[in-house]
Amino acid sequence: MTLLAQLTDLHIVDPVQVAAEGRELYVDNNRRLELAIDRVVAETVPPDAVILTGDLTDLGTPTEMAVLTERLAPLTMPVLAVPGNHDRRDTFRDTFDLPWASESNLSWVVDVGSVRIIGLDTVVADRDRVHSLHDMQHHGEFDDERAHWLDRALGEASDRPTMIAMHHPPFVTGIGWMDAMGLRGADRFAEVIADRPHLTRIVAGHIHRTITATIGGVTASTSVATVHQVELDLAPGAPVQIVCDPPGYTLHRFNRQGRWISHVRHFDTGSPVINPTWAD
Ligand SMILES: [Fe+2]
């Protein structure tokens, strides 16, 4: 049995910079990660590894990375991280010690118990040239270099149950404004993963809510975020909408029968108890 905790879209901030810029936050992002980590540590069955599927920071600055490192410190298991559109590759490389594919492709392959995890970097190639929220390109990219790398990585241990962890989900969700910043090259991705019986699970972040799909027969999902969530509105042309639905993370259990079972864990945000007026 292998148990993996997937935490995603932590969006750690530098509070001084947020105040100076007057940047809008919907929740206390940094506090949320503390609560999430407390809950992971309290799991009665400790996860064998924690997977972080991108947007670990809001801007990727060294200060944000330092806050992130401090918040992750209570974790004693391996922490496996892929970048998201809000992260920067340079500070990401300095923070995590993982077998990166290259300086510009922060993908990796790590075995946890009987399972192989392939971390896939889907961030646009020139992400590090921009340093503000307005300049960022939020869509993902699955280009030739990464297709070639993933093809090889999937071919290396075809007898080992394998999961791909990535930031941008490789499917269209139906939430239009998020799909507009989706993965470019998703068709190419589907081709590369076709006919790989050992690839049994794909997990992603980015959408800030739990969604499940299948790609070539493989279950693919996004996870609830530790910060704010994205409103579920499938109407064509629906506006950008953020909601403060309960935050959480996902526990993926690979059981002895060789099946993945995934559970959503919501954690306490410390919100006050509501006493509705109708109950007076
Ligand atoms: Fe995010």
Image (tube, grey):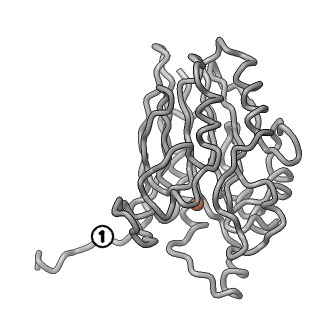
- Against 227, residue 8 (above or below) is above
Q: Tell which of 95 and 194 is nearer to you.
A: 194
The residue at which mark 1 appears reads as 273
Count up the numbered dots. 1
Relative image position of residue 36 (x, y in whole percent): 53, 54
- Residue at the image point whose x is 11% and y is 77% from the top: 278
Q: Amino acid at mark 1?
A: Val
Q: Tell which of 79 and 98 is nearer to you.
A: 98
- Residue at the image point whose x is 43% and y is 66% from the top: 270
- Asked if residue 222 shows in the view, the reply is yes
**Seen in the image, is 135 located left or right of residue 205?**
right
Relative image position of residue 84 (x, y in whole percent): 67, 55
- Against 114, residue 21 (above or below) is below
Q: Dot 1, how many residues are within 10 Å of its Cα: few (below 14), some (14-19), or many (20+)?
A: few
Q: Ligand 1 is found in which quarter of the picture?
A: bottom right
**Seen in the image, is 162 located left or right of residue 232?**
right
Relative image position of residue 139 (x, y in whole percent): 64, 58
- Residue at the image point whose x is 64% and y is 16% from the top: 160
Query: Tag 1, which secondary structure?
Result: loop
- Asked if residue 37 shows in the view, the reply is no
